Image (spheres, coloured by chain):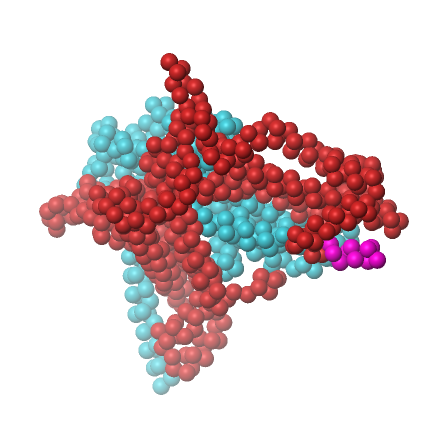
Chain colours: A cyan, B red
C-alpha cells in the first residue's frame, strides 16, 4: 500500500518535472535567442551580402568582414574600445577605494553628523541624475575635461559621487562582529590599521562585487558619455560610438557591423562576469535583504 | 563654576543658535589676549600655544577665504539678486560680453555656501581656543602636533576617510542640484542662453506653466507622462518580481537537474552590456526586423506589425522586454533567499495537507515580501528613473503633436527631462520636471517606507 503511494507520487513528480523542463527549455530559448541572432548577424558580410536588416537569421555565407572592418582603422573602433577599458579599469579601482572608505566610516565609527550625512545622501539620491548634467558639463569644461579630455572627465564624473552608493558594502561591514575591532583596539591597533589589515581582508567578496559593478557600469553608459564627449569622435566610448551605427547610419547597412562590435564588447565582459558570478550573487542578495 | 558648566554645554551647543552665541560671548569675555586675537586672526591662539598644525590650518582657511572673496566670489554674489544687468552687445563687428547669468548663478551659489562654511570654520576656531584654554587652566598638557596628526588615522579616522568623497559629492552633486533648483525659478531657456542673453528670476512662473492645461501649456503632457511613468514603474517592478520568483522556484524545484546551467543562461542578460542587447532587440522588432520579416515570410501577416510606432503596442513591448531584463536579476536574489526558508515549515504544512499553491501563498510569499520589502522599494524608485531601457528601445517615441516639449508616448519623466536638456535646451522646464521627479520619488518612498514591516533601526542588524 505504502509502496504504491510512493510510486504514484514519484510518477506525479516525474510528470511535473517533465513540464518544468519544457518550461525551462522555452525560457532558455527566449533568453538566448537575441544573443544567437547577434552572433549570427555579426558573421553576415556587409560587402558581399548586406549590412542592414534582412528577414533571415543565418547568413548565407559566414564571413569575418564585419570584424575586419572594426580593426581596419576605417573608424576609431580600437580607440573607442581602449577608452572604455581605461575608464572601466580606473573607475573600478577608484570607486572601490572610495566606497570602502565611506562604508567603513559609516559602519564602524560614530561621529557627529553621521545620521545627518546618511539621510542627506539618501535625499540627494532621489534627485534624477541628469538634473546635474548641464552644470557638471560646465564644471568639467572649466578644467578642459570635455571633448578631447572626455576620458579623464568621465572617470571624474563616475567616481565623484560614488560615495553615496555605500549601502551594500556598509551592510556587509555591519555583519562583521564589532568585537573583532574592540579586541584589536585593546591590542593597540589604530582605526586605520584595523581598516586596512583586518576589515578589508575579511571583505574580499564585497570588494570584488564593488569592483565588478563599477567595472561594468561604464560599458553601458550612453548619457553622460555622449554629453561630455559631444562631437569628438576620438573620445567616445563604445556605447556612444556604436549606438550611432544603429540610429543614424543604419540605412547604410551598419547593422551587422554593430553586431560584430557588440560581440567584441560582450564576450570579454561576459567571461569576466561569469568568472566572478559567485561574488555578484552574494553582493546582490545581501544588498537586497538589507535594502 | 563656569568650568563645571562647559563640558555639559558642549554637548548641545551645536543645536541652538542662542547657546552658540552665548558660548562665543563667554569665550571672548573670559579668554586671554591670544583667544581674543583669534577672533580676528584665526588660528592665532593655537599657534601661540604650540598647536602649529591646527593653527596653520585655521590661518590658511582665513587667507584662502579672503583671497577667494576678493578675487572671485564677491563680484558674483552681489549680482545674485538680479543675475546680471549688463547685456552683451555688438559694437561694430566686435561682440562686447556683458554679464553671464549662468556664471553669476553658479558662482553666486558657490560663494554663499563658501561663506556659510567659513562661518562654521570660524566657529570651530573659537571652540578650539576655548578647549585649549580650559585644558591649560586645568593644568593638562595640550596634545602634541604629532598626536593630532596621528589622530587622523585613529579616533578622527572618519574625517580622513570621508573628506574626499564628501568633496566630490559636494562639487558634482550638491552644487549642481542647488543650481538646477534655482534654475527652476528663472527663465533660462533657448531664448535666454548665456553668454549672449541674460536670464533672470521669474518666481513661480515655470511651475504655473507646468500646471497650465491650455493648448500650449505643459499640463496635459505632464499628466500623460506622469501617469505612464507610474504605471510603468508599478508593472515593471511587480511583474518582474513575481515572474522572477516563479522562475527561481522552478529552478529550485526538487529533481530538476542542471540547475547551474539554467541560471547561467538567464544571467547572461545581466552580463551582456545593455546597449548591445537592448539595441539588438529594438532592431529585432523593427518594421524591417527579423520578427516582422519571418512573420511576413510565413504569410501570417501582410504588413509589418508596428511594434514601435503604435503607442499602446510600444508600451506593451517595453514592459515585456523589461521582463526579459528583469527576471534574471530577481531570480538571483530569490534563489538565495528561498534557501533560507526553513524546510520544516514546508514539512509541517505538507503534513497538514496543504497543497503547493497554499504553501506558496502562506509561507513563501509572506517571507519573501517581508525580507525583500526595502528591495522592492528601491526597485520601484529605480524603475521610475529607468533611463536605459526606455531610451535604448524607443527614445520615448512614438512622438505626438498632442504632447508638447518633444515628449513621446513612452517617455518617462526622466527621459523627458533628458530631452528637455539636450535637444530642447529648455533648462527651466527641465529643472521643474527634475523637481517633480524628486517629489514623486520622495513621497512614494516615504509612504512605502513607513508601511514596511521590516523597517528596523539599523543598529538592530549589528
Q: B112 or A15, which is in the foreground? A: B112
- Name the image quarter holding the N terminus of chain A: bottom left
> Where residue B18 appears, x then y in whole percent?
68, 53
Is there any visible trace of residue A153 in the rendered image? no
Residue A53 appears in view: yes
Q: Tag count in the figure?
A: 0
Instruction: Provide residue B424's location: percent of width, then percent of height.
Output: 32, 36
Instruction: Please indicate whether residue B202 sits to the left or right of residue B288 in the image.
Output: right
User: Furthest residue to the right?
Assistant: B139
Residue drawn at the location 50% of the way across and 52% of the way down: A123
| Residue drawn at point x = 35 percent, y = 25 percent | A75
Examine the rendered structure and indicate whether residue B349 appears above or below residue B121: below
- At 32% from the left and 27% from the top, the residue drawn is A69
Residue A263 horizontal/vertical position (percent) = 36, 38
Query: Residue at 41% of width from left, 43% of height from top?
Result: B203
Image position of A97 with respect to B235: above or below = above
Q: Is residue B7 magenta?
A: yes
What is the quadrant of residue A173 in the picture?
A: bottom right
Q: Quadrant of residue A27?
A: bottom left
Main SS type for the magenta part?
Answer: helix
Rendered location of residue B386, percent (x, y): 38, 49
Q: Is residue B364 left or right of residue A183?
A: left
Rendered position, B370 above or below B423 = below
Does residue A162 show up magenta in the picture?
Answer: no
Q: Is residue B429 above or below residue A109?
A: above
A74 and B145: which one is in front? B145
Q: Is residue B34 left or right of residue A238?
A: right
Part of the protein shown in magenta: B1-10
Q: Residue furthest top?
A: B92
Amino acid at each position: 500500500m505504502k509502496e504504491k503511494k510512493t510510486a504514484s507520487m514519484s510518477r506525479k513528480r516525474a510528470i511535473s518535472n517533465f513540464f518544468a523542463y519544457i518550461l525551462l527549455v522555452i525560457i532558455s530559448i527566449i533568453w538566448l535567442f537575441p544573443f544567437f541572432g547577434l552572433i549570427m548577424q555579426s558573421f553576415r558580410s556587409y560587402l558581399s551580402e548586406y549590412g542592414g536588416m534582412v528577414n533571415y537569421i543565418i547568413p548565407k555565407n559566414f564571413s569575418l568582414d564585419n570584424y575586419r572592418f572594426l580593426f581596419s582603422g576605417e573608424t576609431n573602433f580600437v580607440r573607442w574600445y581602449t577608452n572604455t577599458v581605461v575608464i572601466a579599469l580606473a573607475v573600478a579601482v577608484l570607486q572601490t577605494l572610495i566606497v570602502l572608505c565611506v562604508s567603513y566610516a559609516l559602519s564602524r565609527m560614530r561621529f557627529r553628523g553621521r545620521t545627518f550625512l546618511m539621510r542627506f545622501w539618501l535625499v540627494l539620491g532621489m534627485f534624477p541624475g541628469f538634473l546635474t548634467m548641464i552644470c557638471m558639463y560646465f564644471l568639467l569644461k572649466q578644467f578642459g575635461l570635455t571633448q578631447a579630455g572626455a576620458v579623464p572627465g568621465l572617470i571624474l564624473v563616475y567616481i565623484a559621487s560614488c560615495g553615496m552608493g555605500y549601502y551594500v558594502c556598509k551592510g556587509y561591514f555591519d555583519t562583521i562582529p564589532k568585537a573583532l575591532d574592540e579586541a584589536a583596539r585593546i591590542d593597540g591597533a589604530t582605526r586605520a590599521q584595523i581598516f586596512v589589515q583586518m576589515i578589508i581582508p575579511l571583505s574580499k567578496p564585497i570588494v570584488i562585487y564593488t569592483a565588478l559593478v563599477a567595472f561594468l557600469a561604464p560599458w553601458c553608459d550612453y548619457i553622460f558619455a555622449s554629453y561630455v564627449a559631444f562631437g569628438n569622435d576620438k573620445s567616445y566610448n563604445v556605447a556612444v560610438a556604436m549606438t550611432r551605427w544603429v540610429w543614424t547610419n543604419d540605412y547604410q547597412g551598419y547593422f551587422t557591423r554593430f553586431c560584430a562590435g557588440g560581440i567584441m564588447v560582450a564576450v570579454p565582459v561576459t567571461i569576466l562576469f561569469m568568472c566572478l558570478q559567485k561574488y555578484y550573487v552574494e553582493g546582490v542578495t545581501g544588498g537586497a535583504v538589507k535594502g | 563654576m563656569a568650568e563645571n558648566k562647559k563640558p555639559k554645554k558642549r554637548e548641545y551647543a551645536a543645536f541652538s543658535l542662542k547657546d552658540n552665541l552665548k558660548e562665543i560671548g563667554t569665550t571672548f569675555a573670559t579668554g586671554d589676549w591670544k583667544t581674543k586675537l583669534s577672533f580676528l586672526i584665526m588660528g592665532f591662539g593655537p599657534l601661540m600655544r604650540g598647536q602649529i598644525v591646527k593653527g596653520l590650518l585655521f590661518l590658511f582657511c582665513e587667507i584662502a577665504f579672503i583671497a577667494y572673496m576678493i578675487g572671485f566670489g564677491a563680484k558674483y554674489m552681489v549680482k545674485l539678486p538680479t543675475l546680471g544687468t549688463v547685456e552683451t552687445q555688438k559694437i561694430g563687428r566686435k561682440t562686447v560680453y556683458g554679464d553671464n547669468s549662468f556664471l553669476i548663478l553658479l558662482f553666486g551659489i558657490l560663494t554663499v555656501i563658501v561663506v556659510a562654511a567659513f562661518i562654521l570654520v570660524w566657529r570651530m576656531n573659537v571652540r578650539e581656543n576655548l578647549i585649549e584654554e580650559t585644558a591649560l587652566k586645568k593644568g593638562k598638557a595640550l596634545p602634541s602636533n604629532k598626536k593630532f596628526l596621528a589622530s587622523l588615522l585613529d579616533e578622527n579616522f572618519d574625517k580622513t576617510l570621508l573628506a574626499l568623497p564628501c568633496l566630490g559629492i559636494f562639487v558634482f552633486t550638491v552644487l549642481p542640484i542647488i543650481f538646477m533648483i534655482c534654475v527652476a525659478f528663472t527663465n533660462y531657456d533657448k531664448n535666454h542662453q548665456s553668454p549672449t542673453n541674460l536670464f533672470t528670476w521669474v518666481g513661480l512662473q515655470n511651475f504655473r506653466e507646468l500646471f497650465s492645461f491650455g493648448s500650449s501649456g505643459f499640463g496635459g503632457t505632464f499628466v500623460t507622462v506622469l501617469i505612464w511613468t507610474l504605471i510603468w514603474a508599478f508593472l515593471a517592478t511587480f511583474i518582474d518580481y513575481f515572474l522572477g520568483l516563479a522562475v527561481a522556484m522552478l529552478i529550485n524545484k526538487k529533481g530538476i537537474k542542471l540547475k547551474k546551467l539554467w541560471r547561467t543562461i538567464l544571467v547572461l542578460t545581466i552580463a551582456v552590456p545593455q546597449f548591445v542587447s537592448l539595441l539588438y532587440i529594438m532592431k529585432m522588432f523593427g518594421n524591417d526586423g527579423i520578427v516582422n520579416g519571418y512573420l511576413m515570410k510565413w504569410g501570417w501577416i501582410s504588413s509589418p506589425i508596428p511594434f514601435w510606432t503604435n503607442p499602446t503596442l510600444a508600451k506593451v513591448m517595453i514592459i515585456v522586454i523589461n521582463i526579459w531584463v528583469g527576471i534574471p536579476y530577481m531570480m538571483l536574489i530569490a534563489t538565495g533567499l528561498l534557501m533560507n526558508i526553513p524546510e520544516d515549515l514546508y514539512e509541517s504544512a505538507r503534513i497538514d495537507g496543504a497543497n503547493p499553491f497554499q504553501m506558496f501563498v502562506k509561507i513563501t510569499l509572506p517571507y519573501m515580501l517581508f525580507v525583500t520589502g526595502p528591495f522592492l522599494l528601491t526597485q520601484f524608485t529605480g524603475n521610475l528613473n529607468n533611463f536605459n531601457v526606455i531610451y535604448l528601445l524607443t527614445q520615448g517615441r512614438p512622438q505626438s503633436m498632442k504632447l508638447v516639449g518633444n515628449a513621446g508616448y513612452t517617455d518617462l519623466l526622466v527621459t523627458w527631462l533628458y530631452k528637455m536638456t539636450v535637444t530642447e535646451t529648455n533648462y527651466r522646464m527641465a529643472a521643474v520636471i527634475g523637481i517633480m521627479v524628486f517629489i514623486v520619488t520622495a513621497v512614494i518612498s516615504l509612504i512605502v517606507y513607513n508601511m514596511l514591516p521590516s523597517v528596523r533601526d539599523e543598529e538592530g542588524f549589528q
